[in-house]
Every structure is written in C-alpha cells, then in structure tokens.
Amino acid sequence: MKVFVTGANGFVGSYVVAQLLADGHEVYASSRTGDLSSFNTNKNYRFIQVDFSDPFSLHDAFEFVQPDMVVHSGAMSKPDDCELKQSDAFDTNVFGTVQLLLNAEAYKSFFIYLSTDFIFDGNKGMYKEEDKPSPVSYYGKTKTDAEEAVMEYQHGWAIVRTSFVYGKPLYGRGNFITMIAEKIKNRQPFNVVSDQLRTPTYVADLANGIAAIIKQKAGGVFNIAGKDILTPFEMSEAVAAYLDVSDHLLSPVTKDEFKELAQRPLKGGLDINKAISELQYQPVSFSEGLTDTLR
Ligand SMILES: NC(=O)c1ccc[n+]([C@@H]2O[C@H](COP(=O)([O-])OP(=O)(O)OC[C@H]3O[C@@H](n4cnc5c(N)ncnc54)[C@H](OP(=O)(O)O)[C@@H]3O)[C@@H](O)[C@H]2O)c1
C-alpha cells in the first residue's frame, strides 16, 4: 500500500515510518525540513520535503504520490508553543489538516489523524472514544477542530488519540522520559508534576496500533495508549529507580505550583478497551517500555 506520512521527522512519525517499512508498505515520508532518517537505502522509502500548510506544494506532493493512505502525525505538538503562537498553531494544526483532507479526497485515500487526550478537560479521566471533547488549551482546541474536520471526510478515516508518548528517539528531539533521565544522571534540580494522571504510551506500541488500523482499514476513533495510569512524578521515580540513582534532585509539585503557559487536563489518560478488542492491541507495561527506552 502507498502510504503518505506527515511529520516523519517527528518523534511519532519516525516510528510510524519504521513500522510501515517493516510491514512492506511503500512509504512516502514527509516533513517540513529535510530528511533526518537513514531509511533512504530501503527501496520502499521516499522522502518528500513539504509544508502541509502550503496548498500549492501539498497539491504537487499528492499528485506525485497519489496515496492509498495518509497518516497525519505532523503538528505543532507543544501545548505552550500553541498557546503563545495561536495563529501558527491554527495554520499548522487546523488549516494544514484541512488542506491534507482536501488533497486526500482527490485520491480517495484513507485518512488517519493523530490526536490527543488534551482534547478533554481532565475532570473525569480515563476517557473513552465516545466522550465529548472539552479542551482547556489552545493546542487542545486546534486538535479538536481538526478532529471535527476529519470526521466530515467521505473516503474513510480513523482518529488515533494517544497520551504522553515516550521511547528512545530514532532521530530528532527527545521526550519527557529521556529528558528526565538526563536530569537524574546529572543531578540537576527539576520540578515534576505529581497530581496529573496520564496513560504513558510506548511509541513502538503506538506505531503498531496505527499499523493494525491500516491493515484492517478500521474506521472511527481509537484510543491507542499505555495500560498503566501514572503521574509524571511517578514516571520520574521509575526512571530514577531504573538508573539506580537515589540522590537525584527531582521534586514533586502540584499542577498549580508548576506554572505552565498552557493549561493541561488534570486527569487525562485513555481507556484502551476498544483497541484491545477490535485491533488486538496489546501494549507493554510502563516498566517494559521504560527498559526499552533507557537500555
Ligand atoms: N508526543 C506526545 O506525547 C503526543 C501525545 C498526544 C498526541 N500527540 C500527537 O501525535 C502527533 C505527533 O507528535 P510528535 O510528538 O511526533 O510531534 P513532533 O515530534 O513535534 O513532530 C511533529 C512534526 O510535524 C512536522 N510539522 C509541523 N508543522 C509542519 C508543517 N507545516 N508542514 C510539514 N511538517 C510539519 C514537524 O516537521 P519538521 O521537524 O520537519 O519541521 C515535526 O517533526 C501530533 O499530532 C501530536 O499532536 C503526541
């Protein structure tokens, strides 16, 4: 199958590309910047540098690829950046997604959109697919608006909601777990939130879940997340235990003490029962994922 992947230089996109190549798909990896991967020796791999919020360039890219599937993992993904630069966040996360949908329509491509538990307000926690979004940040609002556009698409779509993704970066930027591991090893003081709940998702599991959706052309909303419910501070303690460092300088703080530009849901996390029964999704435990990340 010909799959066009956006955000290929990103953390999630890089794993999606690796998984799809392993599954034998013809992968057209795209990102705004040049190719960071080392996949170009694979005959099924091509890289396309394109800004998906530029309708003209995107049109050319789609005309060239004519994809069977689109996996849209590109985004302005940092909530604080989105809060600060709302117009850029809208252009990237909403306008960009709509441009991708318009182009996908011409080739009747199946469309998979990466979303987040940050579309919820965090009052309830462990959200199910049918729960109603109520974002508390601009990032969450852009992801909700983009989801609504995807749900209008006529040629088959899936929305993959995930939460707090971690793992060893293939290339490009790190993530919370790898950043915390550095702070712990260097005995750097750092405050970590101890009252927010998340279901941390091992990035390879997420890529597997997306591959299962592609295989089954499974339509609808799917929560693809980890199976353990943890606070960021509990995750940090697990990292310190793995590294066997007891004299680290991490301190637990509440969400109200930890000043961040964008508000985060207090009780996030996603119920993954639908993915387990319909996609045979089987995520690793947090401790297994952590071992793979830090090994
Ligand atoms: N990471 C998480 O914990 C998490 C949790 C929930 C949901 N998600 C969702 O999962 C998806 C992937 O997240 P991630 O962590 O992999 O993000 P990431 O590492 O920040 O990667 C996003 C990528 O999107 C690309 N991009 C941004 N604007 C673009 C544009 N206008 N045109 C082309 N490419 C553009 C960037 O490409 P360049 O680098 O080439 O500029 C970047 O590499 C996002 O939709 C995010 O909302 C992530």
Image (cartoon, grey):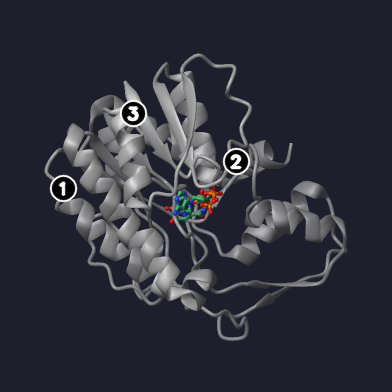
Mark 2–mark 1 CB contact (< 8 Å): no
237 or 99, nearer to the observer? 99
Image point (49%, 43%), residue name: 31
Of the two numbered discs 3 and 2 on the same chain, state the one appearing first in sequence: 3
**Viewer-nearest of discs 3 and 1:** 3
**Where does the image place residue 162, in percent across and percent down from the top left?**
41, 51
Location of mark 2 (residue)? 289
Quarter residue 193 falls in? bottom right
Location of mark 3 (residue)? 64
Q: Which mark is residue 291?
A: none
Location of mark 1 (residue)? 153
Image point (43%, 72%), residue name: 265
Q: Secondary structure at mark 3?
A: helix
As shown in the figure, which amino acid type bears the numbered disc 2?
Answer: Gly
The span from disc 3 to disc 1 (Cα, nearest Å) is 22 Å
Q: Is residue 163 above or below residue 283?
A: below
The span from disc 3 to disc 2 (Cα, nearest Å) is 38 Å
Q: Is residue 93 above or below residue 243?
A: below
Image point (31%, 20%), residue name: 1
Q: Secondary structure at mark 2?
A: helix
